[in-house]
Structures are given as C-alpha cells and as structure tokens.
Image (cartoon, rainbow, N blue to C red):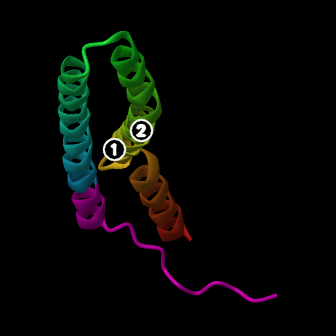
C-alpha cells in the first residue's frame, strides 16, 4: 500500500483571490439581469400589442431563467468561499492536524 508523502497546503491568497473574483462576477451578473430586464421592458413598449406583450412575457421567462440560475450558483459559490476563508473549516482542520503531529 502506497503512503502519501506530500503536504497538503491551504493557499489563503488563492482563496481570497477566488472569493474576490466571485464577488465581482456576482455583481456583474446582477448588473446583467437589470440591463436585460430594461431591454425586455423597452421591447414590450415597442410592441404594444397583445401579441407583443405575450412575446415579451415568454421571452423574459425563457431567457432570464438561465441568468437567474447562474446568479444563484455564483452567489452560493461566493458565499461558500467567504465561509471557508480564514478561521474555521479547512484552516482549523489543518491547524488541529499540525498540533497532533507535533505531539508525536
């Protein structure tokens, strides 16, 4: 049976960088949602007929849903990254392992 001899290292700088980029992406997605919503409202005003209203409602449902879903996923990833950075989660596990290793 092979033993693992490599140290596992948590790179806090990379965690912070990823968290920052995810926050930026979350903001950009929310800005996109607002912009698309405005565009659909403009389109609905340009097609001020019952058929135009129906087309606007369907297009908004179909085309906005992926953007909304992406916003949820990115928001969850961003929140998770912020949760595991620093004290808690991974850092405490490795600190505890280090303390135990030093006892033996």
The C terminus lies in which quarter of the figure? Answer: bottom right
Residue 2 percent across, percent down from the top left: 75, 89
Magenta span: predominant SS is loop
Residue 72 percent across, percent down from the top left: 41, 35
Residues drawn in magenta: 1-18
Q: Mark 2 — residue?
A: 76
Residue at 52% of width from left, 69% of height from top? 101
Q: Secondary structure at mark 1?
A: helix
Q: Mark 1 — residue?
A: 78
Q: Mark number for residue 62? A: none
Vertical placement of 102 versus 43: above or below? below
Q: Are marks 2 and 1 in contact (CB under 8 Å)?
A: yes
Residue at 40% of width from left, 17% of height from top? 51
Q: Is residue 38 left or right of residue 51?
A: left
Along the viewing direction, whichever of 21 and 28 lies nearer the viewer:
28
Residue 97 percent across, percent down from the top left: 51, 61
> Alpha-carbon distance for marks 2 and 1?
5 Å
Q: Give neighbour class at mark 2: few <14, some 14-19, many 20+ (Cα, 10 Å).
A: some
Vertical placement of 87 versus 18: above or below? above
Along the viewing direction, whichever of 93 and 73 lies nearer the viewer:
73
Q: Is residue 23 left or right of residue 74?
A: left
Residue at 64% of width from left, 84% of height from top? 4
Along the viewing direction, whichever of 98 and 103 lies nearer the viewer:
98
The N terminus lies in which quarter of the figure? Answer: bottom right
Residue at 39% of width from left, 54% of height from top? 91
Queried whether the magenta region covers residue 5, the answer comes back as yes
Q: Give neighbour class at mark 1: few <14, some 14-19, many 20+ (Cα, 10 Å).
A: many
Q: In the figure, residue 95 lies in which quadrant? A: bottom left
Queried whether the magenta region covers residue 43, the answer comes back as no
Q: Residue furthest top?
A: 50
Q: Secondary structure at mark 2?
A: helix
Q: Is residue 78 left or right of residue 98?
A: left
């Amino acid at each position: 049976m092979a033993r693992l001899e490599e140290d596992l290292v948590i790179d806090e700088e990379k965690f912070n960088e990823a968290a920052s980029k995810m926050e930026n992406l979350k903001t950009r997605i929310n800005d996109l949602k607002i912009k698309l919503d405005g565009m659909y409202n403009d389109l609905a005003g340009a097609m001020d007929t019952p058929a135009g209203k129906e087309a606007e409602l369907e297009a908004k449902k179909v085309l906005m849903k992926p953007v909304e879903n992406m916003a949820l996923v990115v928001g969850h990833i961003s929140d998770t990254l912020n949760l595991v950075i620093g004290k808690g989660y991974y850092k405490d596990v490795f600190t505890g392992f280090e303390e135990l290793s030093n006892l033996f």
